[in-house]
Amino acid sequence: MSITSCEEEFLERRPTDAISATDALANEDNMQLILDGIHRGLYSQSQTVFPGGDTGRANNHYWVPLGDNLAGDLIHSANANNLSWRSAMQWNEHTQPTSLTTEIFWYHRYNIILHANLLINEIESGTLTETARLKHILGQAYTYRAYAYLSLVQHYGRGYLIGDPASDPGVPILFSSETPFTSQPRSTVQEVYTQIGSDLDAAISSFEGSEPPGVGGAAAKAQLSVDVAQGLKARWALSKGDWATAAEAAAKAREGYALLGEDEWKSGFNSNELSEVIWGSNVIAAETTFFRSYFYLASNTFNGSQVRNNPKIADRRMVDAIPESDYRKDVFLPDAPNSNTSAANGNGGWENNTNPLYETEEEFDAAVAEIKSTYGLTSGHNTHPYMHFKLKNANPGSIDPDDVIYMRASEMYLIEAEAKLMMGDLAGAKEALKPLAEARDEEWSADEFNTEESFFEHIKFQWRLEMWGEGFGYTNHIRWDEGIDHGANGGSGASEVLYQDAFQMDKPSTNDDWIFKIPQAEINANPNLSPSDQN
């Protein structure tokens, strides 16, 4: 398998204090350093994680928003292709076996698995005295392995609910932690899911009676916990139709994480210290990725050309459906002037203005200036109708680093509600969604939805709105077996000329392009994979 070994070469590249391979597993402190390397590898540029990585991908900074970029939820308003972000949106990255996106995503996830294996195999060998701290390291290692395999099988395998998991090819399962590595063929989707479930149960068991590292604040939520393991279990179970397990695990995962108030929700989703955050990367200034970051790709406040020249907009069909009483509507600006003369829709600049709110050029320019002043944009930032300000830099108009959030309590409410509805429990589903829905919209009423079908559509709406920009679009589309149609029902606001073939995509059950290509380099290097294994 073409992944990095844990020899000195890797350890010296790991973005933390380097230690020799001989000493890496000698004690808890050194094991924690390896674990910290995995933590930091989630948001570091990939060449710092393994040889052969590329500066064009800063791992989860790219992979998190990619889910909404592929699903057409994070809409591009102009032609910009920094970091192949436009190519990914056009479905010209994950469908190519030699693309950076296909290759680095695969190798990063297997890099996590390698180092999780290293810790698991040593601790489970019984050569070390079991302590509460060692149990926590083991719990994190099992959780990381489950996280990486779930990520891999959901991208490089057919969706569990739309295929035949017992026979559909998944990804290779590896347990080795020492060179020479033994390559493996692809396991089935079912076999990978079974391994994920086993790892999550082992993680939850290991966390019992364990002692977390002595860190606090935003750094504490960069460490994995039993809550993260339960949250991943909820995701895993939901994606495979194990509704009862999904509902139960989601309820456990969110315990103790208070829903955000309005001010917190509108603060930009840039800090692990938000009350809802269960897990996120605490990005430290010394290892920032600058123009490779999540906020460079997805926000409208970062001071980079991808943002200034290409304001990201939300699907206007979703925005227009948000009730006036729902404060989440405030982070989308339907009436923002189109100040970008290079806008894909051809309506940029005062000369092409179509909004009757602006009767004069002075009114148009004043509205642009007010948005820039309100949200801390620079003079070079463009505006566009339906642009968003959900994701915002803590220091808008800068290139400062911000945390990357992976799991929030809101997601767990959504999982529980969907799972209960799938079990035919409409009343239970409404009760599960109620705390979240009422927190966002004081006038929300479950009485509006009298059938399972109507409430399912509402749950999907809540998913799209609450988790917008946080990367859930891709896996949601696969679970719901929904295609993409930017032209339906009045249109999303996306440009067909810009989006090309990605403007309309058939549903995953009939379109294998939803499945990522296996890296050609992996097929070339792994004797157990052949061209016939390619998706």
Image: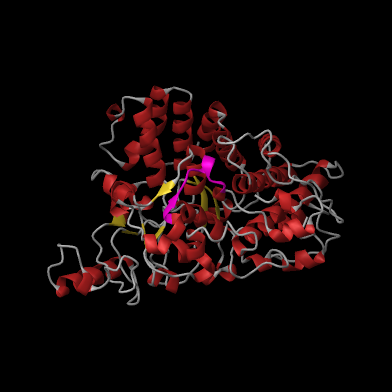
Q: Is residue 494 visible?
A: yes
Q: Position of residue 477 (x, y in %)?
A: 48, 43
Does 73 appear above or below 230?
Answer: below
207 and 527: which is toward the camera: 527
Instruction: Name the image quarter holding residue 76.
Output: bottom left
> Could you tell me which residue is drawn at 48 percent across and 60 percent down?
90
Q: Foreground: 510 or 223?
A: 510
Question: Residue 304, located in which quarter of the rendered image?
Answer: bottom left
The image shows residue 79 at horizontal and vertical percentages of: 41, 69
* Picture mark count: 0
The front one of 450 and 348 is 348
Q: Which residues are magenta?
A: 503-512
Q: Is residue 116 above or below residue 397?
A: above
Residue 171 locus on image (x, y percent): 70, 46
Which residue is at a point 50% across and 52% down the rendered structure image?
67
- Which x, y percent locates residue 329? 29, 50
Asked whether residue 282 is in view, the answer is: no
Q: How is the image coloured?
A: secondary structure
Q: Quadrant of residue 398?
A: bottom left
**Residue at the outermost bottom position:** 379
